[in-house]
Image (tube, rainbow, N blue to C red):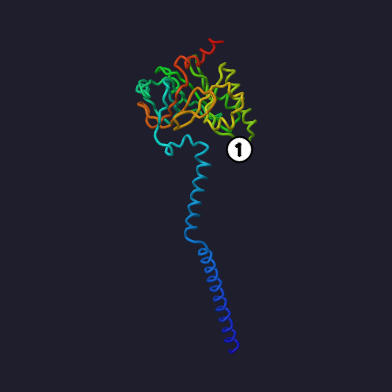
Amino acid sequence: MMNRRTSHRRTTTSASGKGRGRRTRHSHSSFLNLSFLNRYPRWAWWIGGIGVVIFYIWAFYHFFVGPTGFRWRALYGDANYPEGYEIHGIDISHYQGTIDWDELKYAEIEGYPLRFVFIKSTEGSTSLDENFNDNFYQARDHGFIRGVYHFWSNQSTPREQAYYFLKQVHLENGDLPPVLDIEHKPQDKSVEDFQRDVLTWLHIVEDKYHVKPIIYTYYSFKERYLSAPVFDDYPYWIAHYYVPKVEYKGPWKFWQHTDAGRLPGIKGYVDFNIYNGSYYDLLKLTIGRQKEDW
């Protein structure tokens, strides 16, 4: 009996000692944490916190807003209208929903009538815009000069994309040259290989229609990835929002200056564009008219 009680007391004492050891270590750890927090004055913590917030804002802009910053309407405000241009147009896709073309026919921008409409057709090598066919025929039936654009995808080859575009789109005399909308470069591909891919699409489509396709992209993307002299032979449609003038120094034909336009016949926002030239020059750019100049 005595041996069991003695053993019990030793066990209790040992357990109690272990508990005190844990509390001691915990208290010591808390003390160290408080010492660390108190090592710097409060203003230093405020500066550090502000720095972290600024870093997150920068990271968000760099990785999410920067690559397609011209599409972030909420960050820039209302639409503005560059002065000195008379030839206005829009570009549309299924995002505009069902358009009332009878209303749109008489719409004006800054007192000038709409002259041209660019319509999204294909994306990659398998996707056709759900409203393309209706928009394509309605635009011509209501008197607009129409154009069609293909949205580039990094998920399929340029040949697949070009032939899919040609299968789905049948441009006619009086239409604007086909458009390649290109806004992203694969991260795992060199600039030279990327440019070679873009030229492959352009050459295939050019062989079909015998006109230089139009390249659409934002100006910093063109300067960074499509600045080779060979691309200067193609008409350029620049996306550059909420600025009074184009900062790109090279020649350009079209300028998409806002994605916050409003027009009768279209619910919601629509992109506004201008043509850098006269209405006669715009007509000369169309398929068929270019052949007359050969």
Quadrant assignment, res 14 = bottom right
| Disc 1 residue crowd, few under 14, some 14–19, many 20+, Cα 10 Å | few
Q: Nearer the viewer, residue 263 or 275?
A: 275
Quadrant assignment, res 212 = top right
Q: Nearer the viewer, residue 138 or 237?
A: 237
Residue 39, image x and y in percent?
53, 64
Q: Residue at x 49, y 61 (%)?
A: 41
Left or right position of 83 against 225:
left
Which amino acid type corresponds to the residue marked 1 in the rendered image?
Gln
Asked if 121 appears above or below 5 in the picture, the reply is above
Asked if 286 appears above or below 52 in the picture, the reply is above
Instruction: Kindly identify which residue carries mark 1.
Output: 187
Q: Residue at x 57, y 86 (%)?
A: 5
Residue 119, image x and y in percent?
46, 24
Asked if 67 appears above or below 118 in the picture, the reply is below
Q: Secondary structure at mark 1?
A: loop
Residue 17, image x and y in percent?
57, 78
